[in-house]
Image (cartoon, rainbow, N blue to C red):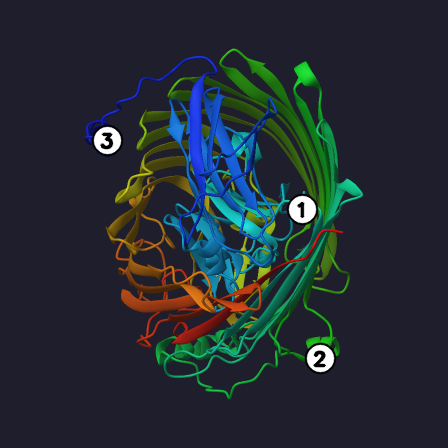
Amino acid sequence: MLFRFVAVLLMAGLCLGFVHTSTAQNGCNLPLAGRITDHESRQGLAGATVIVQPGQQATQTDADGNFHFHVCPGTYQLEVRFIGYATERAEVRMNSAAVRNFQLHPDAVTLRGATVRGERVQAPLPQASGSLTGQALQQTRGQALGEALEKLPGVAAIQTGPSIFKPMIHGLHSNRVAIMNNGVRQEGQQWGQEHGPEIDPFIASDLTVVKGAASVRYGTDAVGGVVLVQPKALRDSAGIGADVNLVGMSNNGMGAVSAAVDGNLRRLPSLSWRLQGTLKQAGNTRTPDYRLDNTGFQEHNFSAAMGWRKDTYGLEAFYSQFNSRLGILSSAIVGNRADLEAAIARGRPAIDPDFTYQINRPYQQLQHDLAKLTGFVKTGNGGRLTATVANQRDYRDEYDVIRSSSDAGRRNLPQLSYQNYTTTADVVWEHPTLGNFRGSVGLSGTYQFNRYAGGTRQFIPFYTNRTAGAFVIERWQHERLLLEAGLRLDHRDLRTRRLTRGFATDSSSYYGVERNRFQFWTPSASVGAVYDANVHLTLRADVALVQRAPAANERYSQGVHGGIYEEGYDISRPAGTPPLQPETSYNLGVTATLHDNPRLNGELTVYQNIIDGYIYQVIGEPITTIQGSFLPWRFQQTDAVFRGVDATLDYKLASNWLLNGKAAVIRARNRTLNDYLIYVPADRFELSVRRDWAGQKAARANQFFALVRGTAVRRQTRVPGAEYDPQPAPDGYGLLGAEVGATLRLGSTPVEVSLAGSNLLNERYRDYLNRFRYFADDMGRNVTLRVHLPLNFSPN
């Protein structure tokens, strides 16, 4: 049925009524024209310098702000910079004659001149993707990375209370979702469901999610997709700029300040730099009826970057440090099974604390360091060579509740302390265009070792992971059709060392060390296509085969952490059964996109992911340990299938009125047991209406907007019948949100101010993907104030 529906969708898309009236032109004679105007007055901006790269074509806009080029077929990124106006960017796919106009918004400094720069960018991906940038990203400031990404259809989050969010793409998360932080694969203790990404979202100017297998580009763990966290490019014009964000929330008293300063010297234009830092603190979260004890958090993060760039070569160094302390809901940690069952049956925590910023046990203490050096060389007819070397250090301490006399001496020490060290190296060669072909060849390597500190509990074993990979991606483009094919082969060598306990014939116990080594060759392959049916309709399709080797925690985790008891597959597997084997994923995705229409635009994605040997966790009957009673989560392996639909729709109701709708529906089944899978996102729908007012250019306040949003989440009725769950899936819920904002002017400085409210009706609800839904409700009404202050100073 799914494939039949996809076929009907494609045929319907081709017959939507958009008639392609212009004939595609061959060669490098495609007209690209446009006009640059002031957003408020609509007057043309004369004398703008327009540059298109490669080729160094240049012209100047005429008296009315018009420009004109002839370019080759391909995809271009146009960037418009007008001193005194905010920067605008747009992607243009050139298959036929095209017109691209820019309306610039006034910025902080005096008008001096305009520059429009364009550079060739990577061809569009065959996978569906979504991005948060500009104002859409600004509306998420202050949220955790996983929480912010929930704004995109098809993206959900596994929650652990109100402050820990782990991104989930099309029902997959953790070891199946790669996160690229400034071009480097994020490596730490990402295997834990309650381990949120150690990334400061304020660092990003663009958050992109590639939905669907992207393993050829990003490694075999990207079975479900990849999250790209991309900072703003280093400044390339003389002067110093700054960016300040202030965020305050009413519900948990959260306050955040983040600032970035970047610069470029007129006397040394090749050298650019940036410094950035964030401070963030929150107290106990409030549900509609009570506060959640010990749910505050603290962050202090910083980053620095410096780059040297010429036309044919460049070098950039980057360093960041993320520091966080996260409180864990105290009512989720109980002393015995009777108390655990009573806490679940009670329906709310036994304690309703006062508001406080204090964080007590249990809590997590995190630090993540990333150092990166990357450089490129353009070799003329030899293409472009890029190399990246990065080192990451991840420290995670978990402080449990002190319950036994044996732990009394560790009152100021963690019960679990992990240390993860990772070195990665990547080399990519992009060969020059050969007719209609473009492509790249790459090599990558990873050396990683994970330790736990002496004197703390063993949860996952010591392990050393060595991975080497090679890939090739080739693209063929002719007029409106782009084809892409890729191959990758990885070799993973995982060596583990863990402490085991045995018993002698006289019943005395002894300890030994068990050493294991696992080696796997894991191939990946993908084929995709992008077809511009006409100037308003783009069709995408991709098919991928991916193998993923099991991680150390999936094999050998054992013990309490984060309020649960976890057990690896090889710890509890029955005698005589084989150890954990690699997963094999067969992924198909089809996307139809309507774009650049005056009224109706949108995107529809249909996907299917069949995973043989799918590794997942099930909940068992409560067990009691010396730390208390917990729900055990045990790793299992089965054959599974995920099918779903993502949709988004924009409709311009009238001038300055925009209606937006989003939907995400996913179905997942355990093919071995012919049953549903646990912890799959429920159906989610969203509808919003937005109104914009430009205002007067000279006014102290302009660019007003107002938005009302409704979100509906259905009850998850498709839950496994054969697996234990201590509480039925919670009821569906609906939430009402609203936001208003404007740009204020303090002298010549624009200040963007917005006020957003979530759960305005103070609805009581519990989300199925919140692991603490057994003990407490989710967050109640919350009002967020955001202030964004961009600054630009005169050139040196």
> As shown in the figure, which amino acid type bears the numbered disc 3?
Gly
Crowd rating for badge 1 (residues with CA inside 10 Å; few <14, some 14–19, many 20+): many
Task: Using the numbered discs, state the Cα–Cα distance from disc 1 to disc 2 in whole angstroms.
Answer: 53 Å
Q: Is residue 204 above or below residue 294?
A: above
User: In the image, residue 223 lies at what x, y percent?
Assistant: 48, 38
Secondary structure, mark 1, is loop
**Pointers 1 and 3 in contact (CB under 8 A)?**
no
Q: Residue furthest bottom?
A: 354
Q: Can you identify the residue that label 3 sits on?
A: 13
Query: For the residues carrying marks 2 and 3, which lies nearer the camera in this image?
Result: 3
Q: Nearer the viewer, residue 205 or 147?
A: 205
Residue type (three-letter) at the residue carrying disc 2:
Ala
- Going by the numbered disc 1, the residue's amino acid type is Arg
Front in this rendered view, residue 462 or 399 = 399
Location of residue 768 by image quarter: bottom left
Residue, disc 1: 235
Residue 667 in the image: above or below residue 730? above
Earlier sequence position, callout 1 versus callout 3: 3
Few, some or many C-alpha atoms within 10 Å of disc 2 (few <14, some 14-19, many ≥20)? few
